[in-house]
């Protein structure tokens, strides 16, 4: 029998190991089709058994913290006996846009305490902090409040999500111990390299990357076919269709898919696995968040650990990337513009802190 290639791991901090492939949770929050709770719990176990022990969720992903909490309770005995490896749950703190101007520490405490209750844990492994609008002051103070909750034992490690280098530097300078920045980073979107690499290397912190397969666009399904007609079938596709336009349009996207397909054939995998492997070989990348909807995707996901892209592969990809128009600018700057087409699709008040 062929020996199974183990899922790669990394120590995010000394003594804290995560799987470099992280099971994303956004698709379980609605907007991506019906979610069968029992099946979702079974899928979580299958991922952990395969070595994908790290889960990503958020306070604003409707029902997802509760679902992971149900999984932790259901498998409590298996964790205690060692039948299942320990799980790491990374959540987020995303204050509502309408709450930013008057946000107090008590507001932050309420959301963190709610995440603890939902997950049924005494300490959150990693909290990734987001802030919608830098023109509204308070992000440094709120990050400091999270650091105080870390000192109290409610949070193990602190990260941020979608922060650009300039504003993350302010938080780090205030003494907040940031270990990770969750950013959109893929073969279609290299903004972290333009904006963040120097700070990440110097501090240091790692990238936890989402958008790695562009909501499914970076797959065999979209190669050699016309651009999908609107309305698109889920929110992820709406978001990443805009990124394809920033990259250079559907024609250049097809050229990229052709190159990825040729490389995939060399390793007997598919386009999505090459796109994922490409990111795992990037400097400063700690892990990639993959929104695999169920365990049916698991076999292909496990193939990511079976090969390495060689310098020729990387050069072939770079030749297409060099033709791209963007996206340009700081991390998340396009999405942060509420009046722009990227920002217009965001939902800004899902915690309903001021309702």
Image (tube, helix red, strand yellow):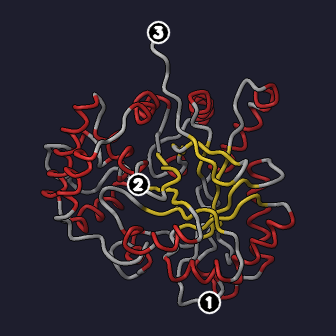
- For marks 1 and 3 on the same chain, the one whose residue lies earlier in the sequence: 3
Q: Quadrant of residue 137?
A: bottom right
- The residue singled out by tag 2 in the image is 282
Q: Position of residue 252 (x, y in %)?
A: 15, 58
Q: Quadrant of residue 341?
A: bottom left
* Front position in the image: 186 or 251: 186
Read off the residue under disc 1.
137
What separation in Å lies between label 2 and label 3 (alpha carbons)?
Answer: 32 Å
Q: Secondary structure at mark 3?
A: loop
x then y, percent, for residue 104: 76, 82
- x 53%, y 45%: residue: 20
Residue 50 drawn above or below residue 228: above
Residue drawn at point x = 67 percent, y = 43 percent: 68
Graded by Cα atoms within 10 Å as few (under 14), some (14 to 19) or many (20 or more), the crowding at tag 2 reads few
For the point 25% across and 36% down, the residue is 264
Callout 3 crowding tier (Cα within 10 Å): few <14, some 14–19, many ≥20:
few
The answer for how far apart the CA atoms under marks 2 and 1 are is 33 Å
Q: Earlier in the sequence, mark 2 or mark 1?
A: 1
Question: Viewed as shown, does residue 239 lie left or right of 162?
Answer: left
- Image quarter of the C terminus: bottom right
């Amino acid at each position: 029998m062929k020996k199974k290639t183990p899922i790669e791991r990394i120590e995010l901090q000394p003594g804290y190991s995560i799987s470099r492939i992280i099971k994303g949770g956004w698709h379980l929050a609605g907007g991506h089709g019906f979610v069968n709770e029992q099946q979702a719990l079974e899928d979580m176990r299958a991922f952990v058994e395969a070595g994908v022990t790290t889960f990503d969720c958020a306070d604003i992903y409707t029902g997802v913290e509760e679902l992971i909490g149900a999984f932790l309770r259901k498998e409590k005995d298996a964790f205690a006996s060692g039948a299942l490896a320990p799980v790491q749950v990374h959540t987020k703190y995303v204050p509502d846009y309408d709450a930013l101007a008057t946000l107090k520490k008590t507001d932050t405490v309420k959301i963190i305490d709610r995440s603890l209750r939902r997950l049924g844990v005494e300490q959150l492994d990693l909290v990734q902090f987001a802030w919608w609008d830098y023109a509204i002051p308070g992000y440094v103070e709120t990050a400091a409040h999270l650091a105080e909750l870390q000192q109290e034992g409610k949070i193990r490690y602190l990260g941020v999500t979608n922060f650009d280098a300039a504003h993350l530097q302010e938080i780090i300078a205030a003494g907040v111990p940031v270990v990770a920045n969750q950013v959109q980073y893929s073969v279609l979107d290299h903004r972290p390299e333009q904006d963040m690499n120097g700070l990440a290397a110097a501090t240091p912190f790692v990238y936890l990357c989402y958008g790695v397969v562009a909501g499914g666009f970076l797959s065999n399904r979209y190669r050699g076919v016309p651009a999908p007609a609107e309305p698109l079938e889920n929110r992820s596709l709406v978001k990443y269709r805009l990124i394809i336009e920033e990259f250079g349009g559907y024609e250049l996207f097809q050229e990229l898919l052709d190159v990825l397909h040729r490389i995939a054939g060399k390793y007997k995998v598919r386009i999505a696995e090459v796109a994922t492997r490409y990111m795992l070989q990037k400097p400063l990348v700690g892990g990639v968040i993959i929104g695999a909807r169920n365990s049916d995707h698991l076999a292909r996901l496990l193939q990511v650990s079976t090969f390495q892209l060689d310098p020729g592969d990387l050069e072939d990809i770079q030749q297409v990337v060099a033709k791209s128009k963007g996206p340009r600018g700081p991390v998340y700057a396009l999405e942060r513009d509420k009046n722009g087409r990227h920002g217009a699709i965001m939902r800004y008040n899902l915690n309903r802190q001021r309702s």
